[in-house]
Amino acid sequence: FPVKEIATKPFEGQKPGTSGLRKRVKVFQQEHYTQNFVQAIFDSIDAKGQTLVIGGDGRYWSPEILHIILQIGSANGVAKFIVGKDGILSTPAASNVIRKYKAYGGILLTASHNPGGPDADFGIKYNVGNGGPAPENVTDKMFARTKEITSYKIIEAPAVDITTIGEYTFGPSKVSVIDSVADYLVLLEGIFDFPLIKSFLSSHDDFPVLFDGLHGVTGPYAKGILVDALGLPASSIQNCVPLPDFGGGHPDPNLTYAHSLVEVVDAKDVKFGAASDGDGDRNMIYGKNAFVTPSDSVAIIAHWAHVIPYFKDGVKGLARSMPTSKAIDLVAKKKGLEYFEVPTGWKFFGNLMDAGRLSICGEESFGTGSDHIREKDGLWAVVAWLNIIAAANKDSPNKLIGINEIREEFYLTYGRSFFSRYDYEEVPSAGAGEMVAHIDKALDTGSLNGTEHKSASTGETYTVSGIYNFEYTDPIDGSVSKNQGQVITFSDGSRVVFRLSGTGSQGATVRMYVERYLEASAGKEKLMSEAADGLKGLIDVALELSNLKKFLGVEKPTVIT
Ligand code: VG1
Ligand code: CO
């Protein structure tokens, strides 16, 4: 099998975003487009003689792209590929496989929660040897290569049958097609108290569980873990057959897009509902009238870490991404732990974990995880919650402790950070840019500092105490990431953050994050009230200050979480 060199020309815009290169399938289908990007990956790493993992969420066009990666990877000297059966590996499972088999890195074929299908999205993401997303210095190199590429290398060998587990060859390279679930199940069994969870679930008919895979990658994992290992009935999982177009849905676990879960949980009074996204790294925890906002979820897991066997020797440190609420900071302070605030995107947690300074972290965008791997992990979070609830109930034989009892105890201990995110998806890029410039101007001139703003709907007044643009210096390697979001702070400790998304495939997406803290002494009733009520006034003020509606030309956000 000779190595062929194919001439090509650079494409515009092959810049990896928050989490890899994400574009419409049609864009990836252009002649040479995918090949260029894959060659740019190989030009930016040194994979000769190495082992690479390939997996993904199984979305439309995955088998075709997997074949291209074998062609180009093999031509660039990769010795061995480890491929999930049918090309399937959830993002956390892929991170685990990279670490467990000490692979050099991995290529993940996913656009996460973005819809799939011929007219929807595809994505390619490179992960490094620690199992985490490539850091910015690596993705910057890839982008630079895409701008100067003149040719790529391929080997034209017959396609590997990825539908059957086994050992194969592709040209000079070896290919190992592995079970997508087995290693991941072993991983979770080593982290959580499976016997405790199993005994709690089997003795509690009053605690029905429902997991919704939204036809993403987690279906087979949920079956292996929740049904086969934890003994839940088959009716405890739904939409668990991965489909190339996710059944036409939007596989994003939030109250808007995971309506298939929300409807059944509400109708059947399910005590513990959960969902994951297309590639399995996000999670939502939702019971009837009991929604756990992700910022609280990670803080609650940190608060309860002592009941999880993996953390029996203690927790090293805690962290969150900048826009995520500060609930987890309060846990760190109380427990005397080190804590960090990093930019949006999981890649920023990796160095801290590798340095042994971080155990549990999360993002407001339904991402929660720990240093067991280097990606956020949807099913890990779901099982963590089950572990916590099982442990809490062991000490409460007469009263069932569910999601809301756990939340309430948490708020009464730490107070509550009310949090919400407004997403304005696929708005005109020009308007989004003008809005950013408008806030930057206030930042430069200080024109907003000390000004008072009254909410028309609640009458509350907020006074601006400062504005800054979030910048991060990695404490381990000293790398600096600038312009990570504009933060407006208020005299009562509230804050509003504006950020442009780095995962969209078209136009611009503006995210507005609002946070307001309420002391524990406010009492149960106020602490347990709806986030939307607690935040109404602050949201009015945020919209007014940014002039968002005018700049974006929209009245309402696409999604509120
Ligand atoms: C979004 C989220 C961010 C998350 C990223 C990848 O990024 O806000 O918190 O890490 O998606 O998640 P952005 O740049 O669009 O705000 V996933 O599940 O899409 O890999
Ligand atoms: Co995802």
Image: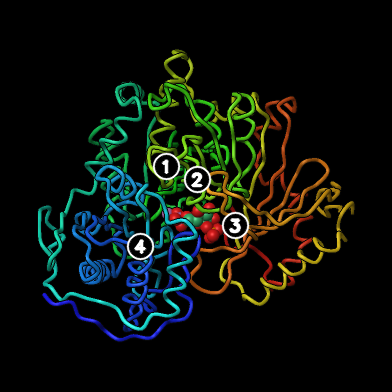
Instruction: Give the Cα distance between marks 2 and 3.
Output: 13 Å
Residue 71, quarter of picture:
bottom left
Q: Which three-letter amino acid code belongs to the residue tagged 2?
A: Phe
Whichever of labels 4 and 1 marks the residue nearer the N terminus, that label is: 4
Element assignment for label 4 = loop
Q: Is residue 21 left or right of residue 152?
A: right
Mark carried by residue 560: none
Whichever of labels 2 and 1 marks the residue nearer the N terminus, that label is: 1
Mark carried by residue 274: 1
Question: Can residue 189 be seen at all in this image of the molecule?
Answer: yes
Whichever of labels 3 and 1 marks the residue nearer the N terminus, that label is: 1
Q: Which three-letter amino acid code belongs to the residue tagged 4?
A: Ile
Instruction: Give the Cα distance between marks 4 and 3.
Output: 21 Å
Q: Residue at x 43, y 35 (%)?
A: 272
Residue 146, quarter of picture:
bottom left
What is the crowding at mark 4: few (fewer than 14 residues within 10 Å), some, or many (at least 20)? some
345 relative to 386, above or below? below
Q: Which three-letter amino acid code belongs to the residue tagged 3?
A: Ser
What is the crowding at mark 3: few (fewer than 14 residues within 10 Å), some, or many (at least 20)? some
Element assignment for label 3 = strand
Query: Quadrant of the image for the N terminus?
Result: bottom left
What is the crowding at mark 2: few (fewer than 14 residues within 10 Å), some, or many (at least 20)? many
Q: Position of residue 247 (x, y in %)?
A: 33, 62
Instruction: Give the Cα distance between marks 4 and 1.
Output: 37 Å
Q: Residue at x 65, y 41 (%)?
A: 530
Front-most of residues 439 and 263 = 439
Q: Position of residue 81 (x, y in %)?
A: 21, 58
Q: Position of residue 235 (x, y in %)?
A: 29, 40
Discs 2/1, front:
2
Q: Which three-letter amino acid code belongs to the residue tagged 1?
A: Ala
